Amino acid sequence: MSDGALLFMGLAWSFVLGLTGWCFYRLLRGPRS
Amino acid sequence: MSAAAPGPAREAWGSRLGLILAMAGNAVGLGNFLRFPRQAVENGGGTFMIPYFIALILVGIPLMWMEWGIGRRGGQRGEGSTPGMFDALWSQPVAKYLGVLGLFMPLVVLIYYSYIESWTLAWTLFSLLGSYRGLDQEGMRAFLASYQDLQNHSVHGFWVPFTFFFVTLGLNIWIVSRGLSRGIERLARVAMPLLFLFAAALVIRVLTLPPTPAGSPALGLDFMYSPEWSALGNPGVWLAAAGQIFFTLSVGMGTIHAYASYLKNEDDIVLSGVATCATNETAEVVLGGSLAIPAVVTFFGVSGAVQIARAGGYDLGFVAMPLVFQQLPGGPVIGAVAGVLWFGLLFFAGITSSVAMATPCLSFLGEHFGWSRRRAAVAVGAVALALGLCHIVFYTGGFLDEWDYWAGTFGLVILALVESVLFMWVFGSDRAWAEINRGAQIRLPVIFKYVMTYVTPVFLILMMVWWTVSPDGALPRLLMKPFAQSEHATRWASRAVLVGILVFQLWLIKAAWARRARLRGGAP
């Protein structure tokens, strides 16, 4: 894979998985801010 | 004034996780696995992800919040479909008629989508039985063509597509007739984890494939994500990205409104809305982006993948992927298992979306005409069956393509624009903002209020203008320019049926409000 492809794939996956992980962490934590 | 008749207490979601899985199930559909990879490779590869994520933040997530907000507010007034919800936002008689779009689109899309969904059920069984084992690319194309064209009996009998359609539609109707918690939520709790499990198993298999003389999984990912910076200067790429966000999140359809109407007044919608989007994006970017294209590039090379991608999503899913499975190391058993996983996950993606599409009409008939859920489900099923047969019979003449464009593509932008203007401008941005934030589990940055008020509607207007005037847009299509003369009659007939459905639903809305006025003893 080229560096550019690796970079874009890494950023896209990090954003999506990071957002999903954060959302479910907050959902499971429960109490309102 | 709201027209919903007073009746028994509304149904409610059994749990928050069930709600989010059902909402995510509504969003995750065939497009996550078939449309997204094609859009990415055709619109700049890695650079496509820039406009894609910008559109997610400026259009997708804001529309998701708006629809959850409109839906929850409607539900508090006993309204589970958009005519009543719009009526509750804007006290003008025309508001309820604008809401017809939230009945029209889900019904129309349900009808043709459940037909496509039935293909995935059929191909799951074909994979299990080894029906396409040993076929080459031409053979596989003929296998699909024979299924789609009733005149072509070279592979499949006349009865095959009908049977799978009956079974698929029957399953959908049975699930929605069981109710929200016992039907839709239970389906989502089973189907969504299985979908992710099947997809993850296939991604691991695809990404660990050994290289072939044609290509490798790494080459496929490189093809998918290599940046083409010039694409960022092309407005078509930005609009393609926004369009993909639209389709993938199922916004502008009326289904999210219907699901959100079963929320309680103080239920969070901010975090739940983002969680729904994020779950869908995981299915699309991480799983959908790592399956079809890397697999096809591994066995057919980049040029072969380009050819297959250009032939359309159905070729990718129903022709190329079965060919890939036959070439997997491990022999026919592994190939059959991979086929069952692939078409099984597509079926789960499809059915969790199609049950959502049935919901607005069921809510409307129940709330406005006092029909039981079962009676409404049978009525919607009967309509879907009758009109779905037209798709099976006239598929090759472009009957389905017309519905997919006018209701499943162009119509979504119209409803999204109407709802964003009604909610943020007519109802008022301050009240809309307060509505969305009531019960919120996370604090939403105030900048999103301005995004929802100004940026999202402008983005939608730009999309609508582009989709009207572009070479393959609404105007040339309306004039039949892209189509062969032989298809014109079928396409006009298809449009006539669409107009008939729209007029009938407008009449139903009129009748519903007249009935309500009679019950209240007042004027309509």
Image (spheres, coloured by chain):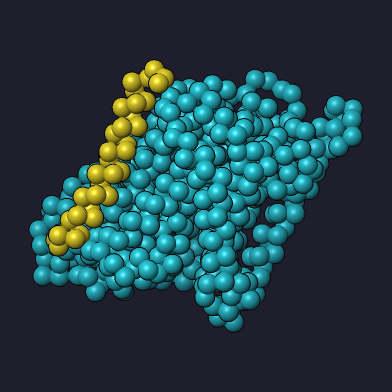
Chain colours: A yellow, B cyan
Q: Can residue B46 be seen? A: yes
**Quadrant in the rendering for residue B479:** bottom right
Q: Quadrant of the C terminus of chain A?
A: top left
Residue lying furthest bottom in this view? B485
Q: Quadrant of the N terminus of chain A?
A: bottom left
Which percent across, then down, holds residue B319? 33, 64
Q: Residue at x 59, y 82 (%)?
A: B485
Depth check: B430 or B481 in front? B430
Which percent across, then down, holds residue B425? 64, 43
Q: Can residue B167 be seen? A: no
Depth check: B392 or B32 in front? B32
Question: On the rendered structure, is B36 left or right of B19?
Answer: left
Seen in the picture, residue B499 relative to B106 is either above or below; the reply is: below
**Quadrant in the rendering for residue B390:** bottom right
Seen in the picture, residue B160 relative to A30 is either above or below; the reply is: below
Question: On the rendered structure, is B92 left or right of A21?
Answer: right
Which percent across, then down, holds residue B247? 47, 53
Q: Residue at x 45, y 56 (%)?
A: B242
Depth check: B284 or B366 in front? B284
Which percent across, then down, holds residue B454? 55, 49
